[in-house]
């Protein structure tokens, strides 16, 4: 089903941008999992709008209410549901969308798929706002993983074509604009500011590194870690590419260059390099799992664009108004972490218990 | 489950490189589907080894036997199972693998996951040979799609870093080495020959174009066409990246550049460009669906490599012998088509029948 | 997953008896389905407590709030979530349950499964109250089916051993105590009143008849209509048996007696009898689909019972206080209809759309 | 999907009565599971035809060939596929079935569902012969369970209305006609012989007892042990009812009679009685899991029956020829065990591994 992810935990995301609420149901969280709500709120805040000059002015607290699955601050083993009320809804901003689809958005494809019955206000179920409930689920899962020494860290590696080539040593310059290097971050911010000034937008690439994973995680064929991660990450709006390890770069290498040769280090088998991104045959090898996701530039730009009037069946120039991010890459970073955490934890729970 | 793909048709691949047989079970094929076995055999031949100087010398007819699901040449509606006997097995070639894992292969990760019980001969269930049963299923599905005017065409767009920049007009130069341009193909072949001479290997990138798809196909979030296609394509051995439309390139564009503006052409809504690869919000927009997959270089290289002896727990130099492709990209082209066809058809069957 | 049912629509039930809310998420409802909320409320009222002298005094309006999936009064195609607030919670009534499990309830099995972390208040996720959200989903589906001429009608056929042998002609005596015959209903009510007076409870059998189904619905083996219906109906608390057509009676018949012979009636193929309950090989034959479900007597009885103190690990006499139905059979009737409707509609949506 | 069962192991049954082969694919068997093939063959023999005077004269060795998933005699962790060749096929016996459907069989419903494309020979995929591959999967799982002290024992409790009221102490009178009491078995056999002499058939009831299960197995709602077992057992041809513990009898009891009161026995919590069949709230309580399945009489009777000629659209008298069992109940006993074992093992594998 399209709005549900997972085999061993199931995460179902519901809601539309302007429906009474958005939310998430998580089945399969082990009973007795303590949730640190303050920490969760801090995680959600990283995704929230209004953090800096580049994000939409729409302000919402994004404070989840837990309707079920929690007793005190602990999971009780049955489905957990949390909702966030949509309070700051301005439906009038979106009245034209139903008639004149925005280029690069799902307006037209939703119109065709749902034969006009879709909730078009604010992009409906296709809105980036739906990543908030994904982050509730992912934020809880991240807490579980961290207790086991599994760390999921995403960061910006390029924005608008500006690459951060600084080596990543696990430390990020700025939690609200997480990069390995400080210099590139400044240039990226300038690039975003310039795009904003033009009424335009830019995209970028996010890299995610997962350390502490046990070797032997994942399954062959369609159950590989690549498949599992891609299957959730492509569910984040604006993601148009996912690659692991060297990814597309590996296609230009020779086998002797791309293979990661084995060594023994402190009695443990490691690889000298990590071109495979910690995955061979779909299964983790104990090295850091590394993947990158390409984020297309936000399609909501203030510049005039060509569209069509669906009612009159003729071409029509469109100018999008309202509150939009010139670059969603910084806010997408925690969403990538949430998605990766869910995929990894689902694979972990898929390991079979011995008798 | 890891070796099963699909919600509406289910494709289960079974077998190991040197088990008595490999095969596939397909559930959900509509009854009354005529199968052109000759055409299917021709499709399987494109994946078969021994087609040219670049592929392994292992020769197998790869002729499937249909055990169930077919009456005469027509599907009967219940599960279709086809098997290919493994005849030309040379288990002795692989005796060392269990002890000294090959870099870049799944030998070590399988050893850890299955605690030594895996079938290591010839890579077992992780062998590229398992793409043959996937091609049986995909080959039948391709026939169904073609009758409906849906065409799935993959081609090589780069090998060993050599790119084919010729525009693709639907015509391929050579079915056994499918490229848009003839010139690049020659250079790619030289590159492969050079790698072979060095005992090395090269990878490449395959682009797949699907035309004739209805608009409105796919679902939001985790049921998007990107998710569905990535979830099967990453199941093909050696794939390390998947991108749609402009993919990673789009991350460097501005919104105004990357958005595909709408026009009306012969009364139908089209887009001027196709940067989104025919997918918006996970749902097709009626333009060609375009994706690319990165194929890493074959890890089986004749050059000496560093590995470890799992029994003695010490480092050990390894030289791989046996029959290996210096470049599997040409043989992977029909596999990509098979996988894409299955993903697309599964989405098509997911559309709900009206009463 | 345990709290989710369905392949083509997915119904996920969440909540606990005393959590902030209970609710349901339904994925896969076709866009453009109008919901008659008044009719839905009337359906929910049939399940609500406090309708007559036999049901618990706990009074809750059971008015769902629709958080997503609805625009105006019409489905928009993306997940529908509805919640019912738990307002009249009296947690103190249940303080002892965690320590001294009630015989016949899930108290002890939940304690073991969730290692003490379960929400024990009011039975938690195991409470009969969780059938309310199932009825929200089922009530909407019933409206869809009715528009297509498919009618799902359940009725009481026995209570406390008293059978209603009146032939069912589609008419029910009393919507709040639905039986075919009026006489048996009176005796059943007396039986319930007597049990109540004794501080005891009684069970019963509910029969469900579905008319208007197309022939050819359902799938072989594990996708049969029997499997599908049983898989949801056993999810209703207190159901301990499900049978189709003659069911257990057929085991005592001869083949020549039990077979339903074919006739032609008004140009259509019918069967003379309907011992098979409208299902052969798991697939509907166009005759009414008939099944029965056995409802065990409510385990909450006021009489003293033997239990154990889990803390002190010794036997302990228990007397259950609080508000309990002496017979839940009348309130279970709409729940059976809801469950049957969901199972049938899921099978209907599973039929593949032609190109 | 209809021919696949399970969440944690997946059992896919394929084949038709007269296709080249029938078989099963099992995904999710842990690597390193030793299979005792001799014991498995003995188990399959219990289901085989030709064991006694009551079963069809069709003789087939039913010796599976293992195509994948096994190395030596041990599972390797990837999908196991086993096939049985259909050798003794007599397609001519069945030529009329396509035109004149047999009452009580799936002939007509398959014709409608598959629009005439079904494999009608010998009942196709609906044939009882398809329980042989289910028994391959179940037979392996039974071996796994037995090593863990979990025993699955089914027996005949009634045939043609004749009940065996002897108490079951774990011992069976005759493995080929398993009952608790010897006396009833004789009467049942006479009853079958009488039916056979008349060209008729009889059904019966099978009870299955599973001992050694851990408490806490199964999940609430639709993941209950009742749901899981019913969902597979109704996939066995001819099953028309499934009940747990007292089942339909419990509907006539009072709560105080039906509740199983708790006691402490040797320091462990037990119940005085086992009316609930070892399941409360869908979850095992550590007492034996008990269920019964109603087997309808074989629909293939030699007596003349009324049917219709589908081609001429008129009523037609039919006399079925060929080889048929007057009572399939004895052969269904191991099939029930196989199905129950798979359901139970799937639930066991669903318990999550701690980190």
Image: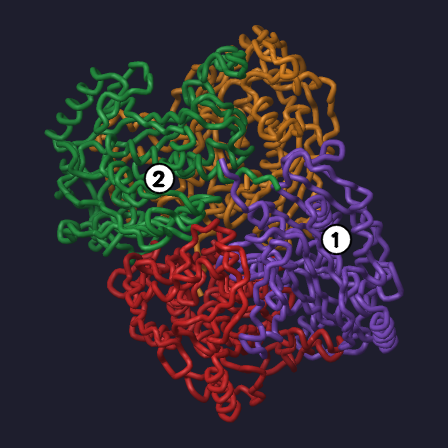
Chain colours: A purple, B red, C orange, D green
A335 above or below D280?
below
Residue B308 drawn at (x, y percent): 53, 61
Residue A13 drawn at (x, y percent): 66, 50
D129 or D154: nearer the viewer: D154
A163 or B1: nearer the viewer: A163
Q: Residue at x 71, y 65 (%)?
A: A207
Q: Which residue is mark 1?
A: A132
A306 or C15: nearer the viewer: C15
Nearest-to-viewer mark from 2 and 1: 2
Residue B352 appears anywhere in the view: no
B68 or D272: nearer the viewer: D272
Which chain is home to disc 2? D
Residue C117 drawn at (x, y percent): 67, 29
Q: Secondary structure at mark 1?
A: helix
Q: Which mark is residue D138?
A: 2
Residue A305 appears anywhere in the view: yes
Q: Residue at x 36, y 35 (%)?
A: D142
Q: CA distance from mark 2 to mark 1?
A: 44 Å
Give the left or right position of residue D301, taking residue A214 as reference: left
Could you tell me if the residues under marks 2 and 1 are in contact, i.e. CB atoms within 8 Å? no
Q: Residue at x 24, y 42 (%)?
A: C263
Q: Does label 1 lie on the same chain as label 2?
A: no
Residue D85 drawn at (x, y percent): 22, 52
Residue extending farthest bottom? B183
Give the left or right position of residue B324, taking residue A341 as reference: left
Which chain is home to disc 1? A
């Amino acid at each position: 089903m399209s709005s549900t992810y997972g085999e061993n935990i199931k995460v179902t995301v519901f809601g539309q941008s302007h429906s009474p609420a958005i939310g998430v149901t998580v089945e399969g969280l082990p009973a007795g999992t303590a949730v640190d709500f303050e920490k969760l709120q801090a995680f959600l805040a990283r995704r929230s709008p209004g953090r800096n000059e580049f994000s939409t002015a729409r302000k919402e607290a994004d404070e989840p209410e837990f309707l079920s699955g929690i007793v005190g601050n602990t999971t009780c083993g049955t489905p957990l549901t949390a909702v966030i009320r949509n309070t700051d809804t301005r439906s009038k901003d979106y009245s034209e969308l139903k008639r004149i689809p925005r280029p690069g958005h799902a307006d037209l494809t939703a119109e065709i798929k749902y034969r006009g019955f879709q909730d078009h206000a604010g992009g409906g179920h296709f809105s980036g706002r739906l990543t908030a409930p994904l982050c509730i689920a992912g934020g809880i899962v991240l807490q579980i993983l961290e207790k086991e020494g599994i760390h999921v860290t995403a960061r910006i590696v390029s924005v608008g074509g500006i690459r951060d080539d600084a080596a990543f040593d696990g430390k990020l310059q700025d939690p609200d604009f997480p990069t390995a290097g400080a210099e590139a971050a400044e240039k990226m911010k300038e690039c975003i500011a310039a795009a904003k000034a033009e009424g335009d937008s830019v995209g970028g690439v996010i890299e995610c590194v997962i350390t502490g994973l046990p070797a032997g995680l994942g399954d062959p064929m369609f159950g590989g870690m690549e498949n599992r991660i891609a299957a959730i990450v492509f569910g984040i709006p604006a993601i148009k590419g996912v690659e692991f390890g060297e990814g597309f770069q590996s296609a230009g290498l020779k086998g002797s260059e791309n293979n990661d040769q084995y060594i023994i280090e402190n009695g443990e088998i490691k690889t000298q390099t990590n071109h495979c991104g910690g995955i061979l045959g779909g299964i983790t090898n104990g090295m850091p799992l590394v993947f990158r996701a390409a984020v297309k530039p936000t399609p909501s730009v203030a510049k005039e664009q060509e569209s069509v009037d669906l009612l009159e069946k003729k071409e029509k120039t469109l100018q999008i108004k309202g509150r939009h991010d010139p670059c969603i890459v910084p806010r997408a970073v925690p969403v990538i972490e949430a998605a990766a955490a869910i995929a990894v934890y689902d694979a972990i729970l898929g390991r079979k218990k011995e008798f």
